[in-house]
């Protein structure tokens, strides 16, 4: 199915509301918050079509909808077409290793997610953001924190295999390591290293992609 402009607008609205609220999104809430200019019944019908096509998921019969990996992928691909720069403030005249350390800390603080930096020439990995990431509501689910920690370990062990000189977004089952279908990874690779932001799929892709793109442009 080709998504219409209206369906794309509704899908993106569901993703943005779910990222903000961490709760299934109903058609009533969506119409109230997003003002599509169409009837609630039409919004419901379009959401059902998006569910039937695998872009949305209804966890319970009486619940609203949440994005699937396919829904997040549509949202992220549209974001990539509309990127605009944001300012990154980092100390000037840093040694390369100091820059990577400070940039990793900056990414964790600004994203409120987990950040990783890797300097290939020195085989050093920096990790930051453990305090904030486990405050996310997803980690109430039993075993999810352990899965996340295991994913970080696997990513660090196999970091050379995902070392690509570009910005890449992996969502859920797209991720290059196991134990990661509940999470997303955004990486930015350079000639001599890599940065990554990692967290639940319900992350702020817009903000995080811009942060990494701007770090990428400064290397």
Image: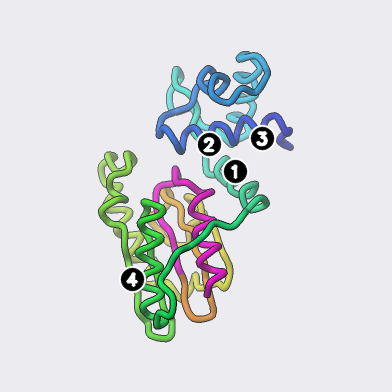
> In the rendering, which numbered label is found on residue 15?
2
Residue hosting label 4: 126
Mark 1 or mark 4, which has the lower sequence index?
A: 1
Crowd band around label 2 with a 10 angstrom C-alpha radius: few (<14), some (14–19), many (20+): many
Mark 2 or mark 4, which has the lower sequence index?
A: 2
Mark 1 or mark 3, which has the lower sequence index?
A: 3
- Number of marks in picture: 4
The relative height of residue 74 versus residue 156 in the rendered view (above or below) is above
Q: CA distance from mark 4 to mark 3?
A: 38 Å
Residue hosting label 1: 75
* Callout 4: SS: strand
Residue appearing at x 41%, y 78% in the figure: 119
Q: Find residue 206 and report its horizontal and vertical position in percent.
A: 54, 48
CB under 8 Å between discs 2 and 4 = no
Question: Does 21 sit left or right of 146 as displayed?
Answer: right
Question: Is residue 199 magenta-colored?
Answer: yes
Residue hosting label 3: 8
The relative height of residue 5 versus residue 28 in the rendered view (above or below) is below
Q: CA distance from mark 2 to mark 4?
A: 31 Å
Q: CA distance from mark 1 to mark 4?
A: 30 Å
Q: Where does the magenta region start and end?
A: 195-219
What is the quadrant of residue 47 in the picture? top right
Q: CA distance from mark 1 to mark 2?
A: 7 Å
Question: Does 21 sit left or right of 65 as displayed?
Answer: left
CB under 8 Å between discs 1 and 3 = no
């Amino acid at each position: 199915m080709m998504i219409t402009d209206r369906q794309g607008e509704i899908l993106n609205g569901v993703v943005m509301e779910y990222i903000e609220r961490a709760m299934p999104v109903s058609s009533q809430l969506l119409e109230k918050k997003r003002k599509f200019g169409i009837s609630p019944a039409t919004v419901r019908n379009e959401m059902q079509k998006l569910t039937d096509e695998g872009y949305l998921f209804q966890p319970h019969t009486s619940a609203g909808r949440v994005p699937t990996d396919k829904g997040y992928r549509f949202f992220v691909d549209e974001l990539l077409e509309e990127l605009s720069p944001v300012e990154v403030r980092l100390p000037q005249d840093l040694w390369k290793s100091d820059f990577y350390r400070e940039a990793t800390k900056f990414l964790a603080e600004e994203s409120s997610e987990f950040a990783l930096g890797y300097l290939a020439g020195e085989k050093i990995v920096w990790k930051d953001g453990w305090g904030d990431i486990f405050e996310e509501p997803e980690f109430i689910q039993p075993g999810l924190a352990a899965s996340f920690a295991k994913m970080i370990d696997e990513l660090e062990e196999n970091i050379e295999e995902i070392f690509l000189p570009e910005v890449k977004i992996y969502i859920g089952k797209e991720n290059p390591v196991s134990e990661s279908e509940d999470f997303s990874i955004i990486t930015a690779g350079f000639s001599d290293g890599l940065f990554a932001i990692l967290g639940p799929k319900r992350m702020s892709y817009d903000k995080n992609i811009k942060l990494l793109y701007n770090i990428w442009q400064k290397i």
